[in-house]
Amino acid sequence: MRKILGIAAILVCVTQLGAQTPPAAQTGTRRIPQFENDRVRVWKSIIEPNQPLTQHRHEQGRTLIALTGGTMKIVQANGSSKNVVWETGKAYWLDADPPGQTHADVNEGPRAIEVIVVEMKK
């Protein structure tokens, strides 16, 4: 009888753990780390419409893979900008940013743009 009660208690605990509500899903523009070692850093960026990534720079070259494509406006710190189109399912090479140059990524489209970025380390 004790053995049955013990097994029942374990099942109740496991069931309760499985029923716990997961943490609230993160929303808004964000960068989600995926993997890093001494050669490479990988993250997923989700850029929501009209929620730009803040000014930043990339010291190293990187590959971008568009999971959900769209048109991204790249805004330099000096105010100049250009539009780039990321096609869903395609990969792109981006060189390191020139010394001292920063940019912000702005999604002016109607839906989120999601990309995986694989940045090489020296």
Image (cartoon, rainbow, N blue to C red):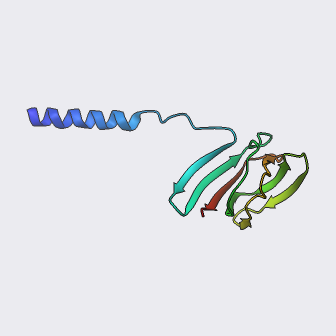
Residue at the outermost right position? 80
- Image coordinates for residue 101, horizontal then vertical, percent: 80, 52
Q: Is residue 45 left or right of residue 40?
A: right
What residue lies at 60% left-to-right and 62% top-to-bottom?
121
**From what the image shows, is residue 73 above or below residue 7?**
below
Q: How many marks?
A: 0
Q: Which residue is drawn at 42% across and 33% down?
A: 20
Q: Is residue 80 left or right of residue 37?
A: right
In this image, 27 relative to 108: left or right? left
Q: Residue furthest left?
A: 1
Kindly identify the residue that appears in the image at 56 percent across and 61 percent down: 40
Q: Which residue lies furthest to the front in this view?
A: 99
Asked whether, in this view, residue 68 is left or right of residue 2, the answer is right
**x, y percentage for residue 47?**
72, 46
* Residue 15 in view: yes
Judge whether residue 1 can be spotted in this image: no
Which quarter of the image is occupied by the N terminus? top left
